[in-house]
Amino acid sequence: IDLLWESKESYVPPFYKGKALPSDGASIYVTAFPNMSNGVNILSAKNLSYLWYINGEFIDNVSGQGKQSALIKLDFLDEKTDIKVRVRSPEGLESEKTISVYPHSVMPLFYLYDELLGTRYSSLIERRFETSTDFTLALVPFYFSTKGFLSSSISYSWLLDGLPITPTEKTLMSFRPKENSVGSRNLLIQLSNSKRGLQDAETSLDIFFDTRK
């Protein structure tokens, strides 16, 4: 039996080439692909019975004949969730497979934003950013359990040097350093997901600017 899982609810940007990872308390889809034979023919997956277990506990509502896929919520009390499926054939053949799925931290990341091109995903900004001109930041909340980063379930609090500020848009902030000035500012963003109580995160950025001519 092969077991494959995917986290359809975890946010990643369009055309992201990696795998969307589940964060704490997220739900994932798990699909079993059995390869069972009665010695003559390969048995059809839809004619088999599937018994699903989470951390050793039988889950009745996702088990049954032909139920080779299950929607499973990760256990937020443990560092990993063990998912087991036991597959049975009408002839009494049986096999099982177990996988462990680990939650991943939510990753709010900064990118430069261009008014014409949008978010420049090739321009990741880490903990420090230096500039001599105006710029706009885009915040991308990787792995939050939401269909879109503008979802009403996600709240964003922007703080500049500890004081609340209003972003240009929910996940965009434009900065215009004063002419002929030099200095630094600290930007802090706190995020929370009302649909997943444990999905809180924050990120910060030190901005250094020098507009002297």
Image (spheres, helix red, strand yellow):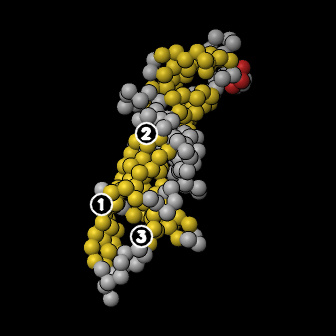
- State how far apart marks 2 and 3 are (Cα): 28 Å
Which structural element holds mark 2? Answer: loop
Disc 2 residue crowd, few under 14, some 14–19, many 20+, Cα 10 Å: many
Residue flagged by tag 2: what amino acid is it? Answer: Gln
Number of marks present in the image shown: 3
- State how far apart marks 3 and 1 are (Cα): 14 Å
Residue reaching furthest top? 92
Q: Which residue is mark 1?
A: 161
Residue reaching furthest left? 183
Quadrant of the frame with the C terminus: bottom left
Q: Determine which quarter of the picture holds residue 17.
A: bottom right
Disc 1 residue crowd, few under 14, some 14–19, many 20+, Cα 10 Å: few
Residue flagged by tag 3: what amino acid is it? Answer: Phe
In the picture, the disc for residue 199 is 2
Residue flagged by tag 1: what amino acid is it? Answer: Asp
Quadrant of the frame with the N terminus: top right
Image position of 64 (left or right of 97) = right
In the picture, the disc for residue 9 is none
Image position of 67 (left or right of 74) = right
Q: Residue sitting at 35 percent across and 82 percent down?
A: 179
Q: Which residue is mark 3?
A: 175
Q: Determine which quarter of the picture holds residue 68.
A: top right
Q: Is residue 23 above or below residue 121?
A: above
Q: Is residue 96 above or below residue 108?
A: above
Image position of 211 (left or right of 45) = left
Which structural element holds mark 1? Answer: loop
Which structural element holds mark 3? Answer: strand
Q: Residue sitting at 40 percent across and 42 percent down?
A: 200
Sequence order check, earlier mark of 1 and 2: 1
Q: Is residue 5 visible?
A: yes
Sequence order check, earlier mark of 3 and 1: 1
